């Protein structure tokens, strides 16, 4: 009886593009890099500035100003006595775990989506670290127009989240339908 081997090859049909799987590690690495940048900038301002100390960078529109945010975005629920720390920490943890799982399942060619998710992950974890370690989030980027208008002070994690969401929306509105037709 001849010795025959049956080999199976993994094929992907045109309707099922290959998913990230273990290639998600690259996207996790990007998230870790952005999170490290966020944490280093926060440590710099926390150690070199007094609370609400300001340095004008571009007058009259941009300062470095150290602030502590006990709430969520724009200090939402900041004055609620401390329970919000655990709510926002739990929410950030759940979102982060969901993003990590989702990054493994998205198509490999969805690079803009993966980058956006990585940035949101980095920002969520960066602010989660502050919230758990300190009970507040360190903010230091202050956009304003003189004394007439002030945007809430924010940080690099917030920047990453906002850029990430923008990339996810661009992917959803401009690229996702093209991937489905491949």
Image: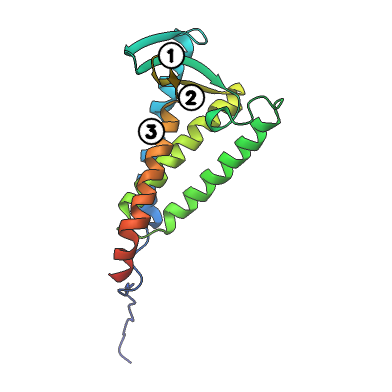
On screen, 88 above or below 179?
above
Q: Please indicate whether residue 31 sits to the left or right of residue 3 in the image.
A: right
**Earlier residue among tags 2 and 1:** 1
On screen, 117 above or below 154?
below
- Would you call the spot at circle 2 few (<14 residues within 10 Å), some (14-19), or many (20 or more)? some
Q: Please indicate whether residue 85 sits to the left or right of residue 61 in the image.
A: right
Residue 83, image x, y percentages? 71, 31
On screen, 63 above or below 22?
above
Q: Name the residue under label 2.
A: 152
**Earlier residue among tags 1 and 3:** 3
In the image, 145 versus 43, the foreground residue is: 145
Q: Give the label, 2 or 3, closer to the camera.
A: 2
Residue 166, image x, y percentages? 37, 44
Could you tell me how far apart the alpha carbons at marks 2 and 1 are, in whole angstroms? 13 Å
Quadrant occupied by the C terminus: bottom left
**Earlier residue among tags 2 and 3:** 3
Residue 32: quarter of image: top left
Q: Mark 3 points at which residue?
A: 34
Q: Do the residues under discs 2 and 3 have CB atoms within 8 angstroms? A: no
């Amino acid at each position: 009886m001849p010795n025959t081997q049956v080999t199976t090859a993994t094929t992907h049909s045109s309707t099922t593009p290959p998913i990230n799987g273990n290639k998600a590690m690259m996207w996790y690495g990007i998230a870790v890099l952005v999170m490290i940048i966020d944490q280093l900038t926060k440590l710099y301002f926390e150690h070199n500035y007094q609370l609400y100390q300001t340095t004008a960078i571009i007058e009259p529109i941009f300062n470095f100003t150290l602030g502590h945010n006990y709430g969520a975005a724009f200090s939402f629920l900041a004055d609620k006595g401390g329970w919000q720390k655990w709510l926002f920490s739990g929410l950030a943890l759940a979102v982060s775990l969901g993003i990590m799982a989702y990054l493994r399942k998205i198509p490999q060619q969805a690079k803009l989506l993966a980058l956006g998710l990585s940035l949101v992950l980095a920002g969520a974890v960066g602010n989660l670290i502050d919230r758990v370690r300190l009970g507040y989030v360190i903010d230091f980027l202050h956009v304003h127009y003189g004394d007439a208008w002030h945007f809430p002070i924010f940080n690099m994690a917030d920047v990453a989240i906002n850029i990430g969401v923008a990339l996810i929306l661009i992917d959803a509105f401009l690229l996702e339908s093209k991937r489905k037709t491949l």
